[in-house]
Amino acid sequence: MAADSQKWILMATARAPTNIAVIKYWGKRDENLILPINDSISITLDPDHLSATTTVAVSPSFEKDRMWLNGKEIPLSGGRYQNCLRELRSRAGDFEDERRGIQIKKEGWNKLHFHIASYNNFPTAAGLASSAAGFACLVFSLAKLMNVKEELGQLSAIARQGSGSACRSLYGGFVKWTMGNEMSGRDSIAVQLANETHWEDLIIIVAVVSSRQKETSSTSGMRESVETSSLIQHRAKVVVPSRILQMEEAIRNQNFSSFARLTCADSNQFHAVCLDTSPPIFYMNDTSHRIINLVERWNRHEETPQVAYTFDAGPNAVLIAPNRKVASSLLQRLLFYFPPGPDNELHSYVLGDKTILQEAG
Ligand code: ADP
Ligand code: DP6
Ligand code: CO
């Protein structure tokens, strides 16, 4: 290759929102392929507040694959990044830019290296599903760069191998991750149940209780649960399958009472499994418990549930209101009991909406 031909660089940028599960994924049947022990359902959130933005670059002058997360270089040695890169390279298409004299054949991508820079506009590894936004964005931006012509479902199966929850962030709106049966994991993909225009009145409020990195990552937490909890098997085999059907129906019919009951119950059972793990894992803290109490007291006071709460693997609360009126009443109550401030338990509130994956740059 001539010296000049070493000078080019190609780039692609994407932004992917995070998603919050209302029926949780917790537990794998295959650690390497990231295959879950149950289906899960989530809502994809607003990228202005909760998203990852990733720029990927390729150049013949790059000597190895490198990645920077929030400005700090991180090792790409972990199998997850390598698995995603391998899957994408094997599906890459031809690329040609006649004006700049760049031609990359399908097989040529195997010899090229990538530089990847990603930023999250919300706390990383704090239980707000940064791995979901992060790996969805990584896969989407690399697929764009490498001219990968696959359906979103197939891309979701690649993102899944980065982080399970990431497969659901490739779609907006309401999304189901079907666990699949095949050993290869080919049928363990995300499908869109309804797009972001469905059930438009829903308002999501994220209460950031702590932006500190959690002590137990989701990956090791769920591994310990699978190894030591007996409740987890009952949950995966008996409880979740029927909840999935009920949740799909609640979403289809926009039945908020049913949606809220299922969402709260599933969050609580997921945290019960964490407590049933040995040694027990505490993702929620006192503030999280006080938020649950506030919502439960309010819901019990009314004929039907007003608000749903759900907590991922961290103390931060995701609260879902059926409309603006209830959302503003919820915010008033939250601000009264938990005024945000540097010395207070609660840092900030983020108002959210359902959304779609966006291409940027
Ligand atoms: P969370 O609850 O935030 O999803 P996890 O423990 O599941 O926490 O995952 C955190 C890990 O996800 C990080 O340590 C990092 O390896 C990966 N991650 C987070 N954000 C990104 C990103 N934008 N791009 C690539 N990987 C990311
Ligand atoms: C509690 O997808 O972060 O957020 O697959 O090991 O990367 P890995 O775990 P991750 O787990 C998410 C767990 C959860 C529930 C959910 O998002 O469904
Ligand atoms: Co995660």
Image: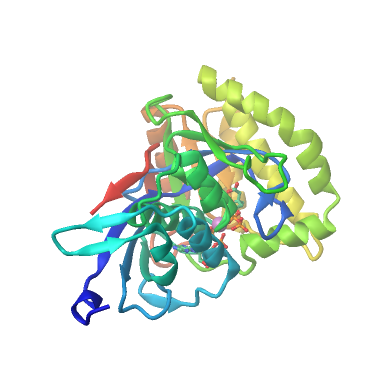
Q: In this view of the protein, which residue sits in the foreground, 166 or 92? A: 92
On the image, the x and y values in percent for residue 108 come to: 39, 65
Above or below, 62 relative to 252: below
Rendered image quadrant of residue 40: top right
Q: For ligand 3, which image quadrant applies? A: bottom right
Which residue is drawn at the image coordinates 25% and 69% (left, top)?
Answer: 9
Q: In this view of the protein, which residue sits in the foreground, 195 or 338? A: 195
On the image, the x and y values in percent for residue 91 come to: 46, 52
Question: If the image is split into quadrants, where does the N terminus sit?
Answer: bottom left
On the image, the x and y values in percent for residue 357 come to: 37, 43
Above or below, 42 relative to 51: above
Q: In this view of the protein, which residue sits in the foreground, 259 or 133? A: 133
Q: Find the residue positioned furthest to the right.
A: 230
The colour scheme used to paint the residues is rainbow
Above or below, 204 relative to 135: above
Number of numbered discs: 0
Question: If the image is split into quadrants, where does the C terminus sit?
Answer: bottom left
Q: Find the residue positioned furthest to the left.
A: 99
Rendered image quadrant of residue 248: top right
On the image, the x and y values in percent for residue 332 come to: 40, 40
Q: Is residue 126 visible?
A: no
Q: In this view of the protein, which residue sits in the foreground, 8 or 33? A: 8
User: Is 33 on the left or on the right of 103, as rendered?
Assistant: right
Which residue is drawn at the image coordinates 29% and 58% (left, top)?
Answer: 12
Which residue is drawn at the image coordinates 42% and 43% (left, top)?
Answer: 45
Which residue is drawn at the image coordinates 40% and 57% (left, top)?
Answer: 106
User: Is 76 on the left or on the right of 281, as rendered?
Assistant: left
User: Is 229 on the left or on the right of 260, as rendered?
Assistant: right
Q: Find the residue positioned furthest to the front.
A: 1
Q: Is residue 100 visible?
A: yes
